[in-house]
Image: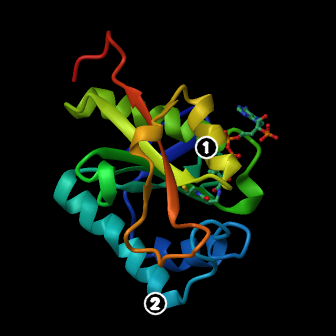
Amino acid sequence: MIETPRLILRPWKDSDIAEFIRLTNTPTVMEFLGGVLSPEAMRESCMRAFASQEKNGFSFWIVERQRDLALLGFCGLKVGSAGPITGEIEIGWRLREDAWGQGYAREAAIATLEWAWRNLACSRVVAVTVRANTRSWGLMERLGMQRRRDMDFDHPDIPEGSPIRAHITYEIGRPTCAEP
Ligand SMILES: CC(C)(COP(=O)(O)OP(=O)(O)OC[C@H]1O[C@@H](n2cnc3c(N)ncnc32)[C@H](O)[C@@H]1OP(=O)(O)O)[C@@H](O)C(=O)NCCC(=O)NCCS
């Protein structure tokens, strides 16, 4: 479990799934993620976090607000599985819409990166999004991540012609003073 001034990041519990779907499977939150998904497809994607936690000791963790334990969404790490980021440590985030614009994603992401430098031997962490998702790449830039145009790619799981197929890639290197 990770604590920040306002948030808790923790592994998923079974009871989080329905709440996460209720709060985040909305047209606005899912705009650049393929739109609202069926509950089955959402459940399947949540289960990947359970599997990642079990296998790797990290995942896209649940983000809870400390003051009322409200579930805000997820932020965390996974092992990248597409194109040039395959095998890389990837940071990702998804918050419910009413939690945007308050610096929660940034606070959770900073804590996630600190966790990565402390607990993993990786030399960098990457992030991907689509060009139109300005909030997501804006956060990458606010975190000090650098655009890696040479690592942009078409996502193999997304059909040709889809506006969310072309992915842009950012990376941040391990701070020189941070030993694993
Ligand atoms: C991407 C996403 C997590 C970004 O969330 P966010 O709330 O915009 O990001 P931040 O936490 O950095 O918040 C930044 C905003 O909070 C404001 N803010 C308010 N209080 C703040 C504080 N204490 N500290 C920092 N920023 C604060 C900033 O001024 C900024 O506002 P602005 O965007 O109007 O300039 C969110 O839009 C999201 O969940 N999107 C849908 C899912 C998605 O697309 N995920 C990414 C897939 S690649």
Q: Is residue 150 above or below residue 163?
A: above
Which residue is tagged 2?
40
Q: Tag 1: residue type?
A: Trp
Residue 16: image x %, image y %? Answer: 48, 71
**In the image, ligand 1 is in what quadrant?**
top right
Which residue is tagged 1?
137
Q: Quadrant of the N terminus?
A: top left
Residue 105: image x %, image y %? Answer: 61, 44
Q: Tag 2: residue type?
A: Glu
Q: Nearer the viewer, residue 73 or 13?
A: 73
Q: CA distance from mark 1 to mark 2?
A: 28 Å
Q: Is residue 66 left or right of residue 85?
A: right
Residue 132 visible: yes
SS for tag 1? helix
Residue 30: image x %, image y %? Answer: 63, 70
Q: Residue at x 73, y 51 (%)?
A: 100
Disc nearer the start of the sequence (1/2): 2
Q: Residue at x 60, y 55 (%)?
A: 69
Q: Residue at x 37, y 57 (%)?
A: 11
Q: Residue at x 47, y 79 (%)?
A: 159
Residue 85: image x %, image y %? Answer: 32, 49
SS for tag 2? helix
Which quarter of the picture shows residue 66?
A: top right
Q: Is residue 114 left or right of residue 105?
A: left
Label tally: 2
Mark 1 or mark 2, whichever is nearer to me: 1
Q: Quadrant of the C terminus?
A: top left
Q: Is mark 2 within 8 Å of ligand 1?
A: no
Q: Is residue 78 above or below residue 178?
A: below
Colour logic: rainbow
